[in-house]
Amino acid sequence: MLCPVEIISRSSRCRDRINKSAVCAGLGIPYFLHVEIRANEVLVEMLRLDLDGAQKPARYASQVKALSGQKSEVIEPFPISFDPVELLES
């Protein structure tokens, strides 16, 4: 697995944001994408596994973070560019 995507819900925010990414980091999955859809905004955060070896257990570091109205752009693990508000459009 290269990059799991977690849709974070209000009812399970801690489990979605902390616990699941910790499990994936421990398995050595290189990227993790958080998507949090709120009432009228979206937060998207691409995380990258910290490979410097200093942190045990393995953890993710934020690579790109964007709110609605901001452009989210990454090259790795795959090129993608969008405004998170597009996730609210039907």
Image (tube, rainbow, N blue to C red):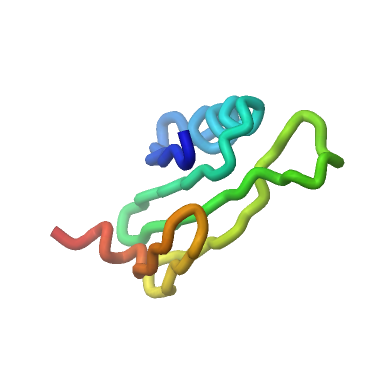
Q: Residue at x 54, y 44 (%)?
A: 31
Eyeballing the image, is 79 above or below 6?
Answer: below
Q: Quadrant of residue 51?
A: top right
Q: Residue at x 43, y 56 (%)?
A: 78
Please state which of residues 90 and 46 is positioned toward the viewer in this rendering.
46
From the top left corner, tell me how far across and down residue 29 is, in percent: 57, 35
From the top left corner, tell me how far across and down residue 2 is, in percent: 48, 39
- Residue 19 in the figure: left or right of residue 88: right
- Residue 18 in the figure: left or right of residue 56: left
Q: Residue at x 13, y 58 (%)?
A: 90
Number of residue marks: 0
Q: Residue at x 38, y 68 (%)?
A: 81
From the top left corner, tell me how far across and down residue 80 is, in percent: 39, 63
Q: Quadrant of residue 44?
A: bottom left
Give the residue furthest to the left. 90
- Residue 55 in the figure: left or right of residue 42: right
Eyeballing the image, is 71 above or below 76?
Answer: below
Give the residue furthest to the right. 54
From the top left corner, tell me how far across and down residue 53 is, in percent: 82, 40
- Residue 48 in the figure: left or right of residue 90: right
Eyeballing the image, is 47 above or below 16?
Answer: below
